[in-house]
Image (cartoon, rainbow, N blue to C red):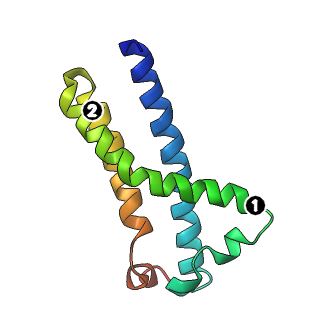
């Protein structure tokens, strides 16, 4: 695989992961803030709705984001010319992962 194809592939995977993780975090925030869902019931209604496959893919992107942020950091360290872009994408994924794992006390601040 050439350098350009590898860079393009990493960019596409990053954007898809960010989009899916954003959908998952927004759904978690919605359930926490609007519906006051406890931890045990998070995403239950999403996975039993008509858009269950859509939310399942978003959850998988969120889980993949944990590892992909580390891959981007290693890629940024190894490649000097991609350092800023990789660090920015990894930071965005880290913020999304942090919001996705935020406790209910954090979300109660927005009610």
Residue at the location (50% across, 31% down)?
A: 12
Residue 72 % position (x, y): 31, 38
Question: Where does label 2 land, which residue?
Answer: 75
Which comes sooner in the sequence, label 2 or label 1? Answer: 1
The image quadrant where one finds the N terminus is top left
Disc 2/disc 1 C-alpha distance (Å) = 34 Å
Residues packed near mark 2 inside 10 Å, few (<14), some (14 to 19) or many (20 plus): some
- Above/below status of 90 relative to 49: above
Residue 102 % position (x, y): 39, 74
Helix, strand or loop for disc 2: helix
- Above/below status of 41 relative to 59: below
Residue at the location (81% across, 64% down)?
A: 50
Question: Where does label 1 land, which residue?
Answer: 51
- Above/below status of 72 relative to 97: above
For this rendering, which residue is in front, 53 or 37?
53
Residue furthest to the front? 1
């Amino acid at each position: 695989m050439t350098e350009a194809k590898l860079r393009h592939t990493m960019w596409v995977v990053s954007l898809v992961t960010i989009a899916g993780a954003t959908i998952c975090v927004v759904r978690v925030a919605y359930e926490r803030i609007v519906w006051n869902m406890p931890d045990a019931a998070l995403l239950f209604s999403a996975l039993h709705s008509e858009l269950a496959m859509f939310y399942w893919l978003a959850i998988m992107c969120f889980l993949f984001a944990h590892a992909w942020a580390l891959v981007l950091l290693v890629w940024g360290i190894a490649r000097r010319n991609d350092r800023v872009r990789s660090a920015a994408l990894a930071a965005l994924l880290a913020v999304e992962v942090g919001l996705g794992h935020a406790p209910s006390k954090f979300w109660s601040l927005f009610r």
